[in-house]
Each structure stands twice: as C-alpha cells, then as structure tokens.
Amino acid sequence: MSGRGRLALCAFAATLLAAGSMLPLVDPASWIVQAAFLLAIQSGVGALARRVPLPRLLIITVQFLLTLVMLTVVFARGQALVGFLPGPEAVQRLADLLTAGADDVGRYAIPAPATDGIRLMLVGGVLLIGLAVDTLAVTFRSAAPAGLPLLALYSVASGLSGGAGRLWFLLAASGYLLLLLAEGRDRISQWGRVFGGTGRSPNGLAAGLEMSSGRPLAPVRTGRRIGALALGMALVVPTSALSGGWLTGSGSGSGKGGGGGTISAVNPLVSLQNDLNQPENRQVMSYRTNSGSPQDFYLRILALDQFTGSEWRPSRRSLQDVPKRLPNPDGLAADVAVTEIRSNISASRSYQQTYLPLPYPATEIKIGGNWRYERAGRTLVGDRGQTTRGAQYTVSSLVVQPTADQLAAAGPASATMRREYTQVPGSLPKVVKETAERVTKGATNNYERAVKLQNFFALDGGFTYDTSVTSGTGSAAIGRFLKAKRGFCVHFSFTMAAMARTLGIPARVAVGFTPGTGQSDGSMSVGLRDAHAWPELYFEGIGWTRFEPTPTRGSAPEYTLPDAPAGGSANPSRPQASASAAPSAAPSASDSCPPQLRRQGECGSSTAPGAAAPKDPGAPVGTVVRVVLAALLVLALLLLPLFWRVRVRTRRLNWSAGRTPADATARTLAAWREITDTAWDHGIGPDDSLTPRKAAARVVRLGRLDPDEAAAVHRVAGAVEQVLYAPQPRAATGLAEDVETVRDGVRASADRFARIRAVVAPRSAVRVIWAASESWSALIGRWAARWRGLPRWPSRQRG
C-alpha cells in the first residue's frame, strides 16, 4: 500500500476515534454511523484526487465542496437544486438548522435528543475536523499539526460533558499516535530497506520468499514504546495531580478526620433550565416520609447567597466532618412549633450531584461515603469524588410551623446577618427597589412585605411562567424580567430575593426539587422537571423561611396564606395512616382550598405512608437489553483476533492435498507461515532479513526448543528451500505434525502471560489490518484507473 494511502486510512481512523468522545452527548448515538460513512467518502475522494494528481489547493477545494454537497443531500435535500446542489434555499435551511441546534444544545441536558439541528452540528463538525486532519496529515504530509483539530474535537466533547472520560481520551490519543506512526513509517521507508525489524509482509514469509515489488516496512518498535509511555503518562499524571493535591491546594478537605477545608461551589443553575425542558421527566430520586404535609417537602441542594450583579452564586465556606446530630438552625427560637419527621431517600444511579438533596432544616443524616458538612447552608458536600449516584440515606428533619403573628413580631436581624445578606450590587436597576417599595406600600413589618412580594409574582402582578425564556441571574436579567413579566423559577426567585434585600430583609435563593409526584405504592417520585429555585428570607426567632413566588410551581407555605390554620403534628415513631387503601397520585379537591393553592393545583391532601425502605425502579428493560447487546458486541470484537487465528491455523494445517508442484509449494509455505506466526504470537517476532535456515535457528534459540522440536523446525525450513530453490523440488511429508511439535515446544517454553496472550490477543492478528490496507489500496487503485485518461495538472508534490 502506498504511503499516502496508509496516511489517509490512519487519518480517517484518528478522526473517527476522536469523534467517539462525543457519543455520550446525544442519545441515540446512531449519528456516528452516518458521520463515518460520509467521512469515508470524503477521505476516498481526497485519495483519488491525489492519485490523479491534482494541485493541493484544488484537492482541498474538491473535498470541501463534496462535504457541502453531502450535508445538503442529508439535511436539506428538499431545498436543494436538482436534489443535491446547495442553492440559496438549501444554504438557508442549513443555517436555520445550525441555529436550532445551538438552541437545542442550550435547552437540553446531556444526553440530548438527536434533533436535526444537533445531528447537523455533530456530523458537520466531524466532517470539517476530518477535512482538516486529512489536509494536514495527507495532502501536506505533516501529521504532527493534525493533532490540533483532533484535540479541538475531544475538548469540545469534554467541555460539554464535564469530562469525556479516560476511555475516550485513550481512543483519541491512540488515533493520533497511529497517525504519527504511519507518517514515520512512510518517511523512513523512503531511505530504503532496513534490516532487523518485524516484517510487514502480509503473508509472513522471510526475505526472499515474497515476490512483492513494494518496499519493506521500517522498524517502529521504539516508536511504539515511546508512544505507549507518553500515552500512559498522559493518563496517570493528571489523575495523580488532581487526586493527590498537586494542583488543588487545600481542596475541599480530607474527608473524615481531616477537619477544615473550603469549597467553592459550582453553580447548579447551569443545568436547571435544561432539566425543566427535558422531553422525558426522568426520575432522579424517590422517597418515603412520615410528614403530614408532603406538599411542603422540598428537597434542597444548596443556597446561593452572593449577588455580584452578574450572577447569584454560593459563598466560599469552610467544611467540617458531618456531626452525628446537626446543630440547631440559625435564628430558630424555642417558642416556635416544630415537628420532627423521618424520611428515607434513594437517588437514581443516573443522578450524579456533588451536593446531597436534603429537606430543610435537616437534623440528622445517616449515609455512607465521603461527605462533608457546610454549616451556614446546612448542606452536605461530596469529598474525594463522592456523588449522589445510587445513594440511599435516612434523614431526620424539622417541619417549622411559625404563625403569622410570630413572623410579624420578628425583631431585626443581627448586624452581621444584615451586612452579609442584604447587599445588592450598584448595577441593580433602580426599578427593582422602586417596584419593591410600590408593591409593599402600606405593610407595617417585614413579614407583610414578604407576603406582598410573593403575591405580586404569584397572583397579582400578571406574571407568566415560561421555561423558554433565556436564563439569566444578573441585574440586567432582573430588569428585563420585571418588564417582560415572563420567566421561570430562576427569574421569580432571584427577583424576589433582590427586592427583599433592597427592603432590608436578609434573603438568599435555594436550589433543589419540589416534592414530586405520588406513586401508587405510596412513595414519591422526583424527576428532572421537578428541579426548582425558591427564595429564603430570614426572620429573627424563626430563621430562614421558604417563600414561593413562582406561579404553577410548588406550593405556597401555610404561614403566607390568609387565616392559615395551625399545622398538625406527626409522631415520627407512629406515622399517620392514609385514609384510603391506595394513596392517589393526584391531590383531591377541596371546597375550602385557598385560591392560590387551587390555582397551583395543590388543593387537597396527599398523605404519604410511613418511612420505609426506598425503592429504585432501576433501568428500563430496553436500556438493559441495549447494554447487554453492547457488552456482547464489545466481547465479540475483543475475541475477533482469537477466532481469526484459529481459522487460519486450521486452514493452513488442513491444506487440501494436490499432486501438482504448485500444490506442494502452497502446502509447504503455509506450514512455514504457521510456524512463523506461532513464534510471533509467543513473542518471537519474524525477521525478514534472514533466510529460512537462519530464521529456523533463531526460533530454536529464542524459543529454547529441545532437539526433537528443533529438528521439526529445520525440516520445515528445508522443505521451504526445496520448493523455492531446488531445480526439481521434492514434496515434503509430515509438515502438519512438525508444525504441531514446534507449537507445543514454543508454548511450553513461554511463561503463563505469554501463553494467554498468544491465545486471546495473538500478535500475528495484525495481518488482518495489513490485509485491509492492501484491499483499500487496491480499491483506490481501481477507482484511480478510471481517471488515467483525464488530463493531469503539473504538481510540485513529492513522495
């Protein structure tokens, strides 16, 4: 196979391996098959253009125009001229799809659905990267810079998925090393024959046994070792640095017994809008609780308490070991009625979050793993890679039941509390404070002001809940929201918290989940669409208190409703029983339901049964089947070298008998190839620079064969010399028996690992790749033959 053909094949493989890092981004992943097919056409046309040969610039132009035509046929055929030419309407269609794809990327969480726009971005991106790699590595014969577009492709996937994983990095890096090795082989081979290396002959014969006009391949054993070492260091060093603290400094503490430490929390709002817009409400958690008011059972992840003007974000807080019982909530006085409840929570294996969702305020948490406690926000943070994936835990928490009179009589917060939680940036529009003062006009205390703010957003202000509005948490976004009056929970909660701060009320924003949906077995299911944000306002003597300004989401707390009745208590040891045999998933209607709860669909009671073991429904049957099939496919691919080797050995040792000299030659050469490959599989690589007699002596020496086994090797080598060089060759007998004798001897002298590898991953299986390369070269040659009658342009290319 020519050097350029080998480089083109390696460039195609390297691009496809790097594109594999994007598979986790989209479901289903069938787009990769389409991208591979189009990439193969692009690469093949480039190879044909170089065989003509065409000038380099013209080759690149032809490939680019072909890429545009292929994308037009696949994604804009209805608008194309004569079905495939990219006219103005087709170009506009592609531009619209790209715009829609960009919107879909911002709307959906990973894995996103394979919409037309997202598929165009993926397939088109792979083709453009493939064109860049092919241009650099093959057209300009410079493989090293081709690593930059491959790195860009991997980096995009890693950035979107939060880390593409070691497997994808290994595949992408292996493709790049393959490209470098192919270029190195091509460059060195131009210097002529190099002796002493492993042969490249597809048939595995020693020097002088192949009648090939191609030049032999140069040795690359040292290059392979350097590449493997570099790849190993690239995988191990960053991991050690990050986990060992080389780059992280103090990090997030050392886990149990570590003490101290800090954490700079990741803002969870990045994915909140994506979760709300998911086409399927995939379950992330399920729980059972003995709470008497399940509609108030919000699962809180963390609090955002810093407003910088450009965003709301969590403060940098110190961490400590999780105490056996958490301290009392800040500001909660002894005269406020509280009820302690117990809940069992189970997180799905598909849900991975650094923060542990908890009811607020939690008092005791029983969970395994590496978790740290942040006191100000009363949150648990995973340490040393700990996440919520598959977590099952039991939580005791308080249901705080203040009365309207207690909230109205709350004294001023401390100076420290006001200084930290009433700060607003100078960039906040004046309309925010003006609107807050106008809405709360006539209120005599902070509680009345807070209720008026809540009702302004949820009932009286004419606001509409809309998850398609562009997300934003800064001052400008708050100003736009007050003007447009459309948004989702992020806009409602942040705007109310900012307004409360302008009125001198300490405020922050909590992020987590609403109570979820009741199931027929009495458990509650929390899905992605239950993701939510709500404001928490501080009242001295009560503490941080939840409010609900977002219409049609969650439920307004009882203490914010007119003539709110006192909440009943529930004994944790004797949970309240449900009135019906099977709890309903939907709340029942009530004629006495307050207007706000009726508008939000929260009327009636939905009493959950007592705490019990959480139940995770597990993966769907379809997912299990796909995983099993994928595992079987991977296993079959891994065993392909073994199957190929068994088939080849059987064919060689059972060569059909014939009486002609050609049959005798074929049987003898097949036996010699089998001995050569058997030795190669056990670590004795073939040497094309040796004659059959010297090659046999080398196998005997390196394989440490006994006299009988050595005699068998030499008999086969002598038979090879007979059929190739003797004027009247004599047909040899007993070749199959000699091959088996040599095989047993080489196997007996090898160690256990070498014997296992010889069976499971035989080295000689690389001949399959060589055969594929030869077939590819022959295919390109046949296609190029059709171009020979065309006029050729002069080219300055060499090699």
Image (cartoon, helix red, strand yellow):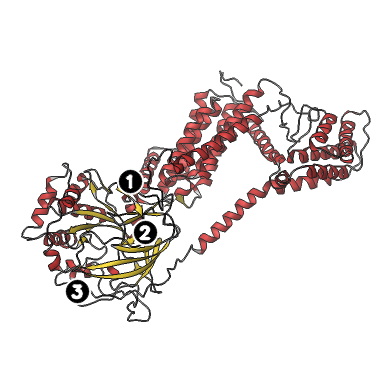
Q: Nearer the viewer, residue 309 or 633?
A: 309
Distance from Cα at disc 2 to Cα at disc 1 = 24 Å
The residue sitting at 45% across, 66% down in the picture is: 616
Q: Which residue is mark 3?
A: 566
Asked where in the image residue 333 lies, by quadrant, the reply is bottom left
Residue type at mark 1 is Ser
SS of the residue at dot 2? helix
Dot 3 surroundings within 10 Å: few (below 14), some, or many (20 or more)? few
x, y percent for residue 52: 59, 26
The residue sitting at 24% across, 50% down in the picture is: 305
- Mark closer to the chain start, 2 or 1: 1
Q: Can residue 76 be seen in this snapshot?
A: no
Distance from Cα at disc 1 to Cα at disc 3 = 40 Å
Q: Can residue 164 be seen in this snapshot?
A: yes
The mark lying in front, picked from 2 and 3, is 3
SS of the residue at dot 1? loop
Work out which quarter of the rendered image holds the C terminus and state it: top right
Q: Nearer the viewer, residue 735 or 40?
A: 735
Q: Which residue is mark 2?
A: 528
SS of the residue at dot 3? loop
